[in-house]
Amino acid sequence: MPTQQGPDPSFVLMNLLIRKLSNYIMLPEADERTLEGLSQTPTHIAAHTDLIREDAPPDGVYLILSGWACRYKTLPDGERQIMAYFIPGDLCDQRIFVLKRMDHSISTLTPAKVAVIPAETMIDLTECHPRIARALWWSTLVDEAITREWVVNVGQRKAFERVAHLICEMFVRVRAVGLAEDLSFEFPVTQTDLADTVGLTLVHTNRMLQELRAEGLIAWKGKRLTILDFERLADLSMFNPNYLHLEHEGAGRCDRSASSP
């Protein structure tokens, strides 16, 4: 996770947004300064805290500066489906401010630092900074591609493949903003969170994790997960990183080799 040391940690954390957007399009220094100059005051949020609930009017766009969050829906019987993970540098859907009321909820999964960007600021970014606007369009397209892949994951892949595929995706996403170390990264979700993401029972999810360990594919200790054989894990889960669209104009700022870290 990004360090909290130094005279201006918010500046360091904001750079994760710049790094993410730079995966899609190269941003001139003036645009980077504009993003760095977002003067929102970060708020410390406890784990498993709703940032906004379904049916509530949105008050802006949520930017994750540190920690993880998720998009989810809860059924009347209490069952929950997690539909997206948000990691540092992610905007929790830069278009939600156009809604009158939310059709889903957004919650932290871990302790997090979050900034709320007002609607007026988002409109200014897109109207006055065309390359930032293009980068945000790419980011939106990637978010939609991830949603499609998650639908395929829950609908068509077997239980083992679902968990393995999600691990592959999150590793590539975390690495794209510079928060992975070799094949190791923070994976701070609980097994309950994971079960609610891949559409399995908690017991079945635990069994799949044990199988991944037994196959020598992963090691997961505390909140840190290490992939022991990425090529085999990707092959077994039918993971193809193309839907993350990291091979565009700005891809030189991240490791381009998703299949062989």
Image: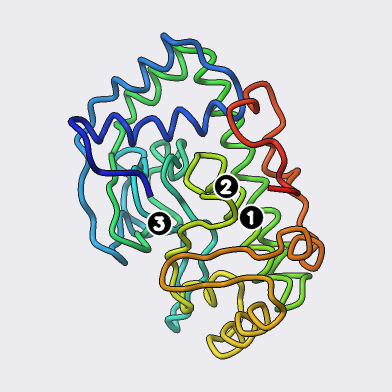
Q: Nearer the viewer, residue 103 or 248?
A: 248
Residue shown at the point (74%, 70%) measured from the top left:
155
Q: Residue at x 50, y 56 (%)?
A: 185
Q: Looking at the image, which is closer to me, 44 or 136? A: 44
From the viewer's perspective, is 27 left or right of 255?
Answer: left
Horizontal and vertical percent position of residue 179: 47, 46
Q: Residue at x 33, y 45 (%)?
A: 58
Label 1, on which residue?
Answer: 169
Residue 123, x across and y down, in percent: 40, 22
Q: Secondary structure at mark 3?
A: strand
User: Which residue is identified by label 3?
Assistant: 69
Q: Are marks 1 and 2 in contact (CB under 8 Å)?
A: yes
Residue 138 in picture, x, y percent from top left: 61, 30
- Separation of residues labelled 2 and 3 (CA atoms): 14 Å
Nearest the viewer among 124 and 114 is: 114
Question: Looking at the image, is 112 positioned above or below residue 238?
Answer: above
Which residue position holds label 2? 173
Q: CA distance from mark 1 to mark 2?
A: 6 Å
